[in-house]
Image (cartoon, helix red, strand yellow):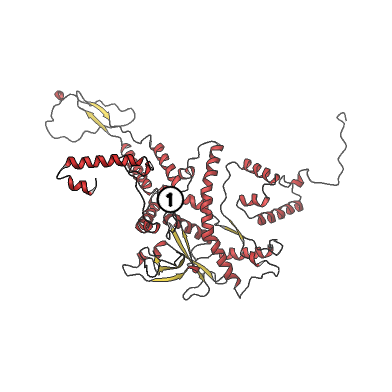
Amino acid sequence: MSWIEKMISPISPSWALKRVKDRQELNARFAVMGYEAAEQGRTHQAKRQTQSANQSVAIGGVSLREQARKLDEDHDLVIGIFDKLEERVVGANGIMVEPQPRDANGEVLDELAKEIRRRWAAWSLRPEVTGTYTRPELERMLFRTAARDGEVFTQLVRGVVPGLTHPNPNGTPFSLEALEPDFVPFHMTEIAKRVIQGIEVNQWRQPLAYHVFYDHPSDSFGITAKTKRIPKENMLHLAHRKRLHQLRGITLLHGVIKRLADLKDYEESERVAARIAAALAFYIKKGTPDLYTPPSETKEGRQIPFGPGTCFDELQQGEEVGMIESNRPNTHLSEFRNGQIRMVASGTRGAYSSIARDYNGTYSAQRQELVEGWESFAVLQQWFVAQQSRPVYRAWLEVELLRSIDPLIIPAGIDKRTLFDAVYLAPVMPWIDPKKETDAWKERIKGGNATEAMWIRASGHNPEEVKRARVKEIEENRKQGLVFDTDPSNNQGVKTDEKPSPPVDDDE
């Protein structure tokens, strides 16, 4: 009803009603000429989003972020979702880096690559300004924060900084400062200075700097917190964005928060109901009202002993003992819960089996789900490597090349364009049946569709390290005279100079 009908209705309700009906009929006729889904009606609300990406995040970003944090604290399902994403995207060993510096002929400089890898491993022990986390631990924390809160910031701290002692005193003077999104204020928007939600941009909306609180806003105790300006080259912004021109990130749970909250409340109600139902209770049925005789004096409640084989022989005339029964636990709870988890998995790039811990099904069904679900993990891996791991490695190597103490020796024949090249190894898809997977890789290599290095990387290892350890192992086995079927050259057994003994006659 429009404002005109609202004004007319007190004077002439029938006229107002006729106008509403006529307008609905006109709208129905015009709807045939356009998209049916665009027409709002009684059964279709046709909700629309007319705000820009930054406006939407500014209105709901903080609330969604805080709700996601609370669910990550209290809801076991949400904890399991983020734990599984950590395992699949970052893994136990973090994003492994294989340096690939090459010479003019395109050959990898193995010695230089080994030295870079050794220094990178030493720095990875304490890469963060507080010295609390190792690099794998820090990467898992950064990913979890970005997925749960929608974004995370990492300041690159290079060289000598007042008040800071790098956790690696004898290593690279380079550290990371991890910052939750609260440190970059959502409310800081200054159009004249082109600052939007704490991020300073140019006329092409390219980030130029980030305005960051010195301390967490919740630790300021009501005092107006001061901010500092950090240039873009010193800050990494890992943000989960869903729309173009969106500056700040949005939580991965933004589309399923209501479902998760409802599911948590429903499960809690079912648990309480089942707990109450587990407390057995009996009642005494007194019979028909005409048999009831009021007690002559006040008596305490009757207690009937209960145990195996108990016989109630003290019941009065017309009395009957009954038990209060309950339909809890709900037999359909698991079916309903699993259906909800499937929707949660589809909205969070997760896998239903991993989230629900339900691994029933044939090998083909499990592998099909794993293959389809792994593509989502691969998207998140590429996002994390491109926005976090690769920039950190390159920034570290830049500082490492500038060291005057124990400098990194660069060979004369190196192609300088490849100095920062590297292969970044994220967790690989696990094998459901190792025998079948191994046979498949063998056939791919035989057919020229893959290499041994690809096979080794698919198992989450470094090809060079595996082959070096393999060569050493085989040489040691031969030196000790050990024969295993893992060495194809030993399939015929150990060769000796002794001649075989003549056959023995059975008669002798």
Mark 1 residue crowding within 10 angstroms, few (<14) / some (14–19) / many (20+): some
Asked whether, in this view, residue 395 is left or right of residue 475, the answer is: left
Q: Quadrant of residue 271?
A: top left
Q: Is residue 237 left or right of residue 222?
A: right
**Which sits in the foreground, 85 or 314?**
85
Which element is circle 1 on?
Answer: helix
Type of amino acid at the residue the image marks with label 1: Ile
Give the percent coordinates (x, y) of residue 400: 59, 70
Q: Position of residue 102 (x, y in %)?
A: 67, 63
**Residue 198 or 168: which is nearer the viewer?**
198
Picture quadrant of residue 341: top left
At 49% from the left edge and 53% from the top edge, which residue is drawn?
A: 86
From where the camera sits, is residue 124 visible? no
Q: Is residue 225 above or below residue 357?
A: below
Q: Which residue is labeled 1 in the image? A: 79
Please state the horizontal and vertical placement of residue 418, each as a whole percent of the image: 64, 64
Foreground residue among 42 and 119: 42
Residue 326 in view, yes or no:
yes
Give the residue displayed 22% in from the left and 49% down from the top: 3
